[in-house]
Amino acid sequence: MLRWILGGREAQGSVEKNPVLFIGEEQPKNWFTELQVLKGHFDIVRFLVQIDDFRWQCCEYILNNTNCRVCVCVCSQTGERLLELRGHSQQITAMTAYTHTSGENTHTSLITASSDRTLSVSLHTHTHTDTYNPVVVFPECCGSCLLVLERLCVWVSGGNELCVWNRDFQLQCQSQHHDDTGISATVELPKNCIAAAMDKEIVIFRLTMSTGSQLSVAEVRRLSDHQDSIHALININDGLFASGSHVGELILWDAVDWTIMAYEHILWEESQTDTQAEIRLAAPKPSEMSIQQLTSDGELMVAAVGSGLYVYSVITKSVVAYRKTAHDSNVLHTMLLPDGGLMSCSEDGSVRIWEMQDLLLPAEPASAGFFGMWTFGRSNKQVGPPVKKVLELPSLRTLELTGDLIGHSGAVQMFVSFGEKGLVTCSTDHLLIAWKNRERESHLRSLALFRKLEENGGL
């Protein structure tokens, strides 16, 4: 009903709703019981970046004209729009916040990259007011990803080249142009190294500081173990990072020597000729086994694979929980929760909260050999141990739906959590929604009312 009240519509595309995942309006474990709809964008809101505990930055891109793209900074407590920033002529491809200290002043810079081959920086000094200096534009700097290296006081933009900038936004160095394959994602590694995803490869760059405090960047290794384009690249902890590909390859890497620590491959059809006895479930579309996003808390890693969710332990190097069909369409963003659960959003317009529970077979309509599709060792490169069936994995758990946040009418691109203060989601329906705890908000409103009455001397 709420979706229709907000002018909503059904999820795009002909998808069959899964009745197993309908939990009704009674959701005792879902404390997001109040929402605030924030309007002001005129097209798809693609990115959200948290600036501090109270503010976030978001941006839209407009696909049908050349209007300036807009970044908006909003207060998470009130939903108030604090400012708008315009400076790009084409869609924004990446966004981040960069906070650094200069003397007694703390500066926060909002950095955006665009397909118009520019980087824009807006500088904010933490004073009593929220004012930003005019946008500084760096032309001819194509960037599809941004990375802040706080330890070195620099930030990095990735496009056809890897460019390194100092905190004064001066270009320090850049990698040599290799080919037309651009950098799609970057992560920081130990020993001043950076891992950059370029199509099927991961390129390792090392930053070197000379005696004259001059930075230089050089390629030191190429990792060519993926068979298809890399869609996700994340840090796990100080010793590990992970990558996921379009064909369902999940690789866990040593962050120091860049060797493979674990290799998992999601397959879908039963193969009689495969020497590793990998089990596949059905012939899907390529997107159904594509790893769209990875997230981790240092011990667990969540892979968004098609419309499913898979929780992987980096300690035991095994799958510990799963939900083969978590949404009606592709999962776009996930987050592990402090209580051991997780949250996900999808192209179908939903935001869902999950709890790990012991697996009671049958957990969902899947074969007993469902997790035979998770293999150990490199596919077609080395022989792994025998595949384990679900019945042989007593510790395997399922993901049980405990909350369903329905408010968006388009694909939910991502979300940002502010802990007990709430959650903010952005969507292709041009809306931002702040989800909050009604009891907490009611208490805060009562306190604010009593405070105002005291200031005015009562009624």
Image (cartoon, rainbow, N blue to C red):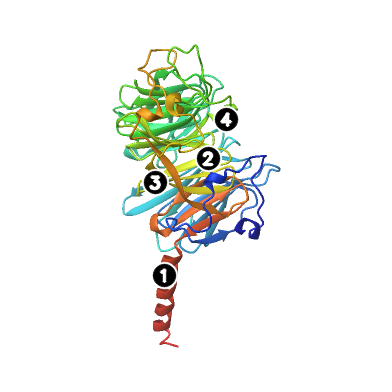
Rendering quarter of residue 14: top right
Badge 1 vs badge 3, beta-carbon distance below 8 Å: no
Q: Position of residue 294 (x, y in %)?
A: 44, 35
Between circles 4 and 1, the one closer to the viewer is: 4
Badge 4 vs badge 3, beta-carbon distance below 8 Å: no
**Mark 4 to mark 3: distance in Å?**
25 Å
Badge 3 element: loop
Badge 2 vs badge 1, beta-carbon distance below 8 Å: no
Judging by the rendered image, the residue that carries numbered circle 4 is 287
Badge 2 vs badge 3, beta-carbon distance below 8 Å: no
In this view, the residue in front, 138 or 80, is: 80
Work out which quarter of the rendered image holds the N terminus and state it.
Answer: bottom right
- Give the class, few, some or many, for how many residues have Cα within 10 Å of label 2's Cα (few <14, many ≥20): many
Q: Is residue 122 visible?
A: no
Q: Earlier in the sequence, mark 1 or mark 3?
A: 3
Badge 2 element: strand
- Up the image or down, 278 lies above or below 126; here it is above
Between circles 2 and 3, the one closer to the viewer is: 3
Q: Earlier in the sequence, mark 2 or mark 4?
A: 4
Of the residues shown, which amino acid type is indicated by label 1? Leu
Horizontal placement of 65 versus 290: left or right? right
Judging by the rendered image, the residue that carries numbered circle 1 is 444
**Mark 1 to mark 3: distance in Å?**
27 Å
Q: Position of residue 376 (x, y in %)?
A: 38, 21
Badge 1 element: helix
Q: Earlier in the sequence, mark 2 or mark 1?
A: 2
Q: Position of residue 448 (x, y in %)?
A: 42, 74
Of the residues shown, which amino acid type is indicated by label 3? Gly
Q: Earlier in the sequence, mark 4 or mark 3?
A: 4
Judging by the rendered image, the residue that carries numbered circle 2 is 332
**Mark 2 to mark 4: distance in Å?**
12 Å
| Numbered circle sitting on residue 341 | 3
